[in-house]
Image (tube, rainbow, N blue to C red):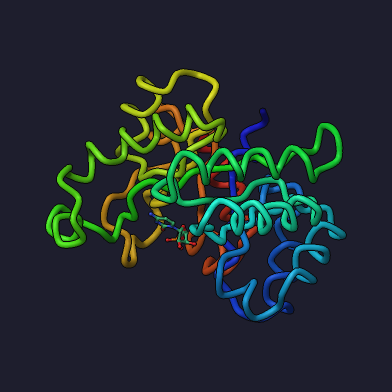
Amino acid sequence: MKPYEKIIVALDVKMEKEALALVKKLKGKAGVFKIGKELFTACGPAIVKKIQKLGGKVFLDLKFHDIPNTVAKAVAQASKLGVYMMTVHTSGGFEMMQAAVKAAKENSQKGKEPIILGVTVLTSLDDKALKEIGFKYNPAQMVLRLAKLAKKAGVRGIVSSPKEVKILRKSLGKEMFLVTPGIRPLWAAAGDQKRIMTPKDAVRAGADYMVIGRPITAHKNPAEAADLIVGEI
Ligand code: C5P
C-alpha cells in the first residue's frame, strides 16, 4: 500500500460542486473519498457514480443500524453502486453484521466486494452517556467487545479513535483494517476534535487508513496539504 492510499478524505460538504472539485484536486493524492450522511442525503447515489467516474474510490459512511433484513438490503444497494468501503453499527448485533457481510458478497462484482467496517462506540458518548442508555461497560470495554464481535461476524475492519488503534491491533490481529479519524498533523488546527493524533503516530500505532477532513479540505491548497501528510507518513 502506498502512503497516499492510506488517506481517506472526508467530503463533509453539501454541494456536489464542492465535492467534485475536491476530488479533482486530490486525484492521486488520496486513496479514498468519504461520503457521509449530509452529502448523500443532499445529492443521492449520483454523487457516488460521479466520484467514481473521476477515478475516486468511495467510502460510503452511512453507518447502517437496523434489523438484519433492512441492513442487508441497504448494503446490497451500496454494493451494486460499487463502493469501496461502507460502515455499519456493530451494536446492531451479530446477526445484523453477518447479514451485511453476506449481502456485500452476493451483490458485488467478483474481487470488488466492499469492505464492511464496523463502528463501535461513537466518540461523542462518554462513560456517563453509556450508562444513561443502559450499558454497564465503559467505552473502552465496549469498543473491544464490539470489535471482537464484528470480527466474528466477518466484518473486515473497525473505525476507531487513534487512541484505540494500538489495543485493537493487538487484540484483533493483522487482518482487520483499522480506520481512524481524529487525525491532525502538527501544522493543522484541532478544531472540535479532542482525542487527536498526528498521521505519523497513527500509522505507527497500526492504522491502515486515516479519515482526514478539514486539515486537507479547509487548507488553502488541499493538494499541498495531502502531499505534506504523505511526506509525514
Ligand atoms: O475534519 P475532520 O478531520 O475532523 O473530519 C473527520 C471526519 O471523520 C468527519 O467526517 C467526522 O464525521 C468523522 N468522524 C470523526 N470521529 C469519529 C467518527 C467519524 O471525526 N469518531
Picture quarter containing residue 140?
top left
Picture quarter containing residue 225?
bottom right
Q: Nearer the viewer, residue 225 or 203?
A: 203
Percent x, y of residue 8 = 59, 49
Q: Does residue 232 lie above or below 166 as drawn?
A: below
Percent x, y of residue 207 = 47, 33
Kindly identify the residue that appears in the image at 72 percent across and 56 percent down: 78
Quarter of the N terminus within the rendering: top right
Looking at the image, residue 62 sits to the left or right of residue 148; the answer is right
Kindly identify the residue that appears in the image at 44 percent across and 50 percent down: 92
Q: Nearer the viewer, residue 212 or 220?
A: 212
Percent x, y of residue 150 = 46, 35
| The quarter of the picture showing ligand 1 | bottom left
Picture quarter containing residue 15?
bottom right
Q: Does residue 121 lie above or below 146 as drawn?
A: below
Q: Does residue 190 lie above or below 233 as drawn?
A: below
Q: How many marks?
A: 0
Q: Nearer the viewer, residue 123 or 137?
A: 137
Q: Nearer the viewer, residue 141 or 59?
A: 141
Percent x, y of residue 218 = 52, 69
Kindly identify the residue that appears in the image at 36 percent across and 29 percent down: 168
